[in-house]
Every structure is written in structure tokens, then in C-alpha cells.
Amino acid sequence: TTIAVNYQAARMMAQLARANGISRFVFASTCSVYGASDGEIAITENGKLNPVSLYATTKIDAEQALRETADDVFQPTMLRFGTAYGLSHRPRFDLVANLFSAQAVTDGELSVFNGHYARPFIHVRDMARACLMSLEAPLYLVGCQVFNVGDESQNYTISELGRMIADLVPGTTIRESTDNKDPRSYRVSFEKIRRTLGFQAGIDLSEGVAEMVAAVRSGRLGDWRDPIYSNQLQMKQHGLHVLKFPVTPPVSEHSDMPATSQFLRRAA
């Protein structure tokens, strides 16, 4: 499913767009492509890619497929979004900032794993605004370009996020531990999109999580543990396969996906 949605569908849509003379194509990629990196150094778009998940490798391969599809008319833009969060029509509570906000309100306790690891957070409304700015910008500025999407001011460690939310919900306790299953840690530079498009975060992390805390407290979202608020639980509920490791990689089937093939070999 991950390969079908993130790679095969993206490549197919790009080919259809080019065949129909469409020039602008905004692809939602991810800063997860940087994976396990030195959390003290802000990574630029030219930084080393070190993915630690199938999700991230399929995004890398999709970006490359879009570059290969590009021509004088079809000029895709790849947006590597930071870690999403924030109130929306269907907020996801399998995302750390939203999850912590809900846990603080209902449980009064946060389980913080790998607290020193860093993430670049971005509110969903800022993500939407970045897409619009990319579509409205002169094509010579954004065509065949990759942009990290976020703001340096929103680079936080997981522990910093936990303390921020605990301050918003008095009485919340924090339990810290180490989870080696998720080694992702990266601080990201957003200089390119700021310089090129003038993009900066319009919603600060503290403002966004306060909005989510208020929404959970009000009861307007119902039970935040409902599977509708989790992509993985939704997949399981509808009988879709959730990839488990180790796996035996059908490498020959993914010869056009070098990043994914390499990841599957390592995971086997």
C-alpha cells in the first residue's frame, strides 16, 4: 500500500499531467527523508538522505521519478514537509504533537521516548499555505525545485514539546524513556523557501498545540482514540496490509526504486 500510494500513484499522476500539458505539479514529500541525522546541524535540501522507514524511501524514489518525468513544460515542485500537527477537519492523533496534546488532557501523563531527538514541526494550515504559494509563484522559481517546508523557529526536541504541553495542561507528568525502534532525529534548514517564496510559519507550535488542547477539552472531537484519527488503525480496520519487518524484499519488482530496494534489503 505504501509503495502503491507514495510512489506508483505519484509517478502515474505525473505522467498523466505531462501528457495533458500541465506544467505545475506540487508533490507532498517529507523531511523524514533525512531520517537519523545529527540533530544539532540544520539540514538543507542538499543534505544527506538517511531514511529509516519505507514511507521515507518511497518519497525519495517518487521525487526522483518526478525529476525524470520533467521536461520543458512539466515542472514539478517537491515540498518536504516537517512533522505535521494541528487542528483540522480530521486531525491525526498518531502524530506526536497532537497525541501529546490529547494525552495531557485525558490521561494527565505523557510518555516521551527519545526526548533528545529533534523534529521540525509545521501546522497543517501552514502546510496548505505553502502549497498555494508554490502554485502561485513564478514557475522559474519553483519548477523542478525541492523545498524544505517549515521554519527554523519550530525545530524542537521531543522533550521540549512535552514540557510545552505540560505547561499548557497543569498537573501533567512526563515519563521519559528510550525507544530504539524510532531513530529519527533531524533539525532542518528552511532558508531556501524563506528566501525564494518568503515563506515563514504563521502558527507557532505553542499556539497550535494550545488550540488542539482546547479542542480535546471541549469534547468537539469525540474520542481521540477512535480509529478514524489514526492512519494505521484505519488501514487495519479496512483490511489493508501494514508492513511488518523483517520481510523478504521482492527487489526485482522495485528496480526503479533504488532507495526503497536498499531499505528492504537492510530490513530483511
Image (cartoon, rainbow, N blue to C red):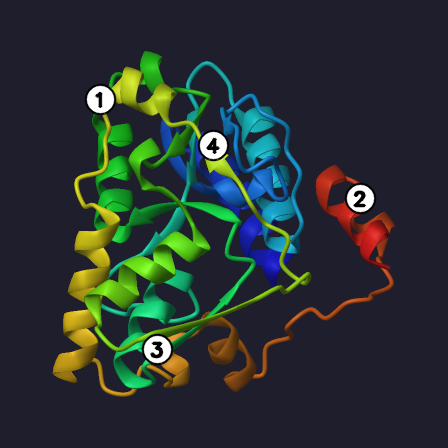
Quadrant of the image containing the N terminus: bottom right
Circle 2 sits on which residue? 262
Task: Give the spatial CA distance, label 1 vs label 4.
Answer: 32 Å
Pair 3/2: label in front: 3
Q: Which mark is residue 198?
A: 1
Return the disc, 3 or 4, that comes first in the chain's sequence.
4
Dot 2 amino acid type: Gln
Q: Nearer the viewer, mark 3 or mark 1?
A: 3
Residue 112 to residue 35: above or below: below
Considering only order in the chain, which callout, 4 or 2, is on the residue closer to the N terminus? 4
Measured in 3D between alpha carbons, the distance from the residue under mark 1 to the one under mark 2, in whole angstroms, is 36 Å
Task: Say whether disc 3 or disc 2 marks the residue closer to the N-terminus.
Answer: 3
Give the distance between the C-alpha atoms of the residues marked 3 and 4, in whole angstroms: 48 Å
Name which quarter of the figure residue 219 lies in.
Answer: bottom left
Relative to 66, is 142 on the left or the right? left
Q: Residue 194, position in %: x, y?
A: 28, 22
Q: Amino acid at mark 1?
A: Gly
Distance from label 3 to label 1 (Cα)? 35 Å
Whether residue 92 is visible to the viewer of this picture, yes or no, is no
Badge 4 element: helix
Residue position for label 3:
103
- Circle 2 packing at 10 Å, graded few (<14), some (14-19), many (20+), is some
**Residue 20 vertical position relative to residue 101 in the rendered view, above or below:** above
- N-term-proximal mark, 1 vs 2: 1
Residue in view at x 22 percent, y 72 percent: 169
Q: Which residue is mark 4?
A: 19
Q: Amino acid at mark 3?
A: Gln
Answer whether labels 3 and 1 touch (C-beta < 8 Å).
no
Dot 1, how many residues are within 10 Å of its Cα: few (below 14), some (14-19), or many (20+)?
few
- Closest to the camera, between mark 1 and mark 4, is 1
Label 2 sits on a secondary structure element that is helix
From the image, state whether disc 3 or disc 4 is nearer to you.
3
